[in-house]
Every structure is written in C-alpha cells, then in structure tokens.
Image (cartoon, grey):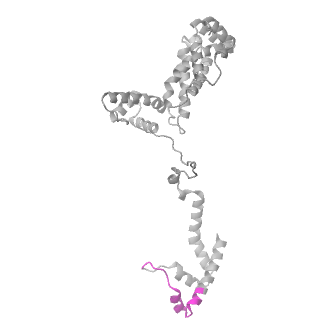
Amino acid sequence: MTTLSGASANQLAVANPWSMVPPLGNLDAYISATNRLPLLTLEEEQGYARKLRDHNDLEAAGALILSHLRLVVSISRQYLGYGLPHGDLIQEGNVGLMKAVKRFDPDQGVRLVSYAMHWIKAEIHEYILKNWRMVKVATTKAQRKLFFNLRSMKQGFKAEAAIDGDTHRDTLSADQVSQMATRLNVKPEEVLEMETRLSGGDVVLDPSPSDDGEEGFGPIAYLADASQEPTALLESRQRDRLSTDGITTALEALDDRSRRIVEERWLKVNDDGSGGMTLHDLAEVYGVSAERIRQIEVAAMKKMKKALAEYA
C-alpha cells in the first residue's frame, strides 16, 4: 500500500480536493481517510484562506476543509450518546465546517481549528435538537444549555453515587438540582422541567393497527373531547334550539284540546317525579274513550313533527 507524503498529499488535495475522500457507504473507511489527510501549517492555512477571501478560490476552500475533516469526526464522537447516527452527526458537522471556512478571516490572529469548532458544534447541536425527539425539547438559549449539559452532569452524579454505594438512584435530589442550577445559571424549576422532558419519550397519540389486525390503543382514546367536536357542538345546539323554541312553535300549531293532551301527557311531571296524565285520565276529563284520546295524540304528534321540520 502506497502512502503520500505531506507535500504530495497537499498538492493532490488542492488539485482535486475530494479525490482523497472514499466513496459514500463505508463510514470506517471515511474516518480512516480523514485521519490520513495532512494538516496544514500556519503559512499554508493563511495562504489558502487569503486565496478564498480575495479571489473566491474554491480549490483553496477544499484544501482548508479537507485538512479539518478529522476535527469534525473528533467533535461528532462527543454526541454519540444521543442515539443519532454517527454518519449524520459528521455530515452536519461538515456543514458547520464549510460555513466556518467561508467566514474565516486569516488576519484575525486565530487558527481555523479554533474558529471552526464553534460552527461545527452549532450545526451538530441544531441537528440533535431537531431530530432527537419529534417534539422539540429546547427552544430558548437557557434550555439549549440545559439540554447539552444536563446529561453529562447527571452521569457525574451517578458516578459519585456508585462510589458511595447508591446504585438505585435515578432521579435528581434537591441538592443536585440546586448544584446544576447554580453551575448553569438557571432556575431550579428549569432544571426539573428539562429533566422531565429528557426522561420522557415520544408517545404515538393514534397508533396504527397491529399486525394481527387489532386496533391500537393510544392516548387519543381518552384525550379526545367528543363534546367539543364541531359536529357534536352543532348537533347539541340544534337539539337545544328544537327543545325550546321549536317545541313552543310546534305547540302553537295545535288546537287547544290537542295542545293540552300533549302537554299533560309528555311535558308535565308530577310532584313525585312520575309522568303526566294517562290516556284514561284524559278520557274522563273530555268524556271520550281512551282510544279517541290516543288518536288525537297521534295526530297532534304528526302535526308537531311537521312543524318542527319546517322550523329546523
């Protein structure tokens, strides 16, 4: 296997910047290749940076990027504990590196490695916050600071607890919360809130049916408020309207005898909670048979139903 010297590798990088990076698909080969890429001296770095700044030399930009790819790999390893693919972390870090190279000023008196670290971490942080959970867990600057410091600080507390023989504690004590709040310059309530967010997981509100065809049960089953559903609200208002103004209008369409029969049979309640008058009671009042009262009631109900339909 042949290897390139630093000078020849630099020349190759400038001539064809991406020729030294292996094709996609093998992360280990990529990392191995980045470790073989030569570092730039201060003079080379400033020369390439001035070519990019003054002449928009893309080959110089490629040389600056290639020489710092190993920095991205190193920084990305610090964020493997968030459960996201290492390749994706490297990819986002490379985006930050390219932004740093574009904005780098060699006359500021700092090396590109120091300047690029901020941009690389910023891109990785943004990627983690967007993809760690479906619901974004940190939006403000204080919450971001908590998010990326709480995990490492908790690991330190767990290590201390293990030394003391307490291996069962998983939640933060009041003293630990106070220490974190003081160290991160936030309120203890914010520490507790972020701890709750980190310890929880994403929950599917409406799960899909299982493989055996059974309907999945999720929070949507008990979180949904059917009474506030728009169609249900409209139907409820319609029923209320018909049971008040609608009934009154329908009763006005009846003659006095029919109206009294309907009111006594269906709209009045006795003091003991029982219903109104029976067919036989009304038959005695009007001096007719109970069957005749039933016929009058049926005819009145049909007339009221038609009046309610027109009212609705």
Q: How many numbered discs, if any?
A: 0
Residue 75 on image: x %, y %: 52, 21
Closest to the observer, 286 or 67: 67
Quarter of the N terminus within the rendering = top right
Q: Residue at x 50, y 31 (%)?
A: 82
Q: Residue at x 61, y 21 (%)?
A: 99
Q: Quadrant of residue 66?
A: top right
* Vertical order, 153 against 308 (above or below): above
Q: Is residue 79 left or right of residue 182?
A: right
Q: Magenta span has 285?
A: yes
Q: Quadrant of residue 274?
A: bottom left
Q: Quadrant of residue 171?
A: top left
Q: Magenta span has 275?
A: yes
* Residue sticking out furthest to the bottom: 287
Magenta-drawn segment: 272-294
Quarter of the C terminus within the rendering = bottom right
Q: Residue at x 55, y 22 (%)?
A: 120
Q: Is residue 37 left or right of residue 187?
A: right
Residue 228 on image: x %, y %: 55, 57
Residue 22 on image: x %, y %: 64, 19
Closest to the observer, 244 or 203: 203
* Vertical order, 260 against 12 (above or below): below
